[in-house]
Amino acid sequence: METKENKISRRSFIKSTALASGAIGTMSMGSSALLSSCKGENGSGYTPLKAAGTYYIPELPDKAADGRELKAGLIGCGGRGTGAAFDFLNAANGVTITALADTFVDRVEDAAKQLKEKKNIDIPANKRFIGLDAYKQLIDSGVDMVIIATPPNFRPEHFKYAVEKGKHAFLEKPVAVDPAGYRSIIASAKQATAKNLAVITGNQRHHDRCYVESYKKIMEGYIGEITGATVYWNGGQLWYKNRQKDWSDAEWMIRDWVNWTWLSGDHIVEQHVHNIDVFTWFSGGVKPVSAVAFGSRQRRVTGDQFDNFSVDFTMENGIHVHSMCRQISGCQDNISEFIQGTKGSWTSADGHVIKDLAGNVIWKYDWEAQKQQFQQSNPYVLEHVNWVNHIRANKTIDMATDLGVSTLAAVMGRESAYTGSAVTWDQISASSQDRMPADLDLKKKMDMKGYVVPVPGKA
């Protein structure tokens, strides 16, 4: 398994990070203009949406530049966390993992075993931390940076402590599951910037060469002014864990976290945030002002979540975005984004293509050129390349703020579907909703009456 209203606007973030990252890396995406095929290669005849240099394009060399040795700690040793640890190790020379933390000992031991077998990295027993407070012990263990891949509801608190202690952070998406977590993320991101820390997030499309090139073409005006969009993550059922007799309430839910709203945010937040985030990114940070949604539960086995959502977002510039996601096997799948403009349209389907209003292809991503120019095109690795490069160059970057906007947009859609009511940005951003259980205890019984499937139209 694998993400904002605040005083630091996306526009100011783009300007600052574009300047901060200009000298990083040995090969720039700016040099990858060959990664396209279109009519009018120089973009003549198009009116840019933004002037070149006013929006952020990441430097994406195959590997991070060499520099000082860096020690990272992994918080959350499940499949995504362990995968992120290896992505980090593959992104640069002179980097290592020195500490592990997880709620459960078996997760830590499995991650340690994999690191030893695949990378010959030994994690000593005194750097293997277990329990709900293990993240504090890891952050205080002498690491330079942390990979935070715990279930999403824990990420705001883990990020907050990491920033307080002056640690660079990689945050998996989404960055929160509720308004309280969102506001915490925004506050911590501001502090991270003030401390010159580098914060990268796991919405890996921002480091996927095809998406980055598509974004550049849209900024260059190839589809004109954006008038609407549809974004999809329609796929099959995910994994689940049946309860074992020796598991407490909390242990069962945390081990089965992807199926519980308080832990994952529901799949519209945990997974579909990727696609919602593509639109907020490509549109220059436009936020939704309201959402009207519906959803239902058809075949999910455990937890308290829906398995399908459909959302009509009204954006602050007046356009509408249709968001659709489903986790039901045996149905029509579609994981893509489509954006309509006054002069044409772009889609990530069919290999990233831009068409004019008559349906003629005017640009498409050149996959063969990518193979010829680069050895590394895995965005899960490239996001760590960018992270290490910023740290070694002593440059700050804040991706948490923008992903916070996308995360809260997904929360808007979820709450509208759960309640059957329209939900506005002003309502959700000011909401007191905090889904962290007050009685969370790994050994004792919890009050499970609140963990029920929502029924729209009921309070």
Image (cartoon, rainbow, N blue to C red):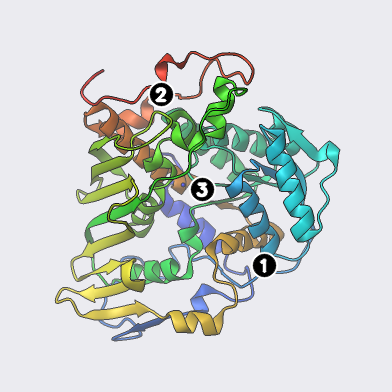
Residue occupying image coordinates x 61% and y 69%: 23
**Marks 2 and 3 in Cβ contact (< 8 Å):** no
Amino acid at dot 1? Ala
Q: Which residue is mark 3?
A: 1
Picture coordinates of residue 120, whole percent (x, y)? 81, 58
Compared across the picture, whether 11 is left or right of 437 comes to left
Q: Which residue is mark 1?
A: 64
Quick one: SS at disc 1?
loop
**Marks 1 and 2 in Cβ contact (< 8 Å):** no
Q: Residues within 10 Å of mark 3 (few under 14, many from 20)?
A: some
Looking at the image, can residue 34 be seen? Answer: no
- Assign the C terminus to one quadrant of the image: top left
Looking at the image, can residue 39 be seen? Answer: yes
Picture coordinates of residue 245, whole percent (x, y)? 58, 23
Q: Residues within 10 Å of mark 1 (few under 14, many from 20)?
A: many
Picture coordinates of residue 202, whole percent (x, y)? 53, 52
Q: Residues within 10 Å of mark 2 (few under 14, many from 20)?
A: few
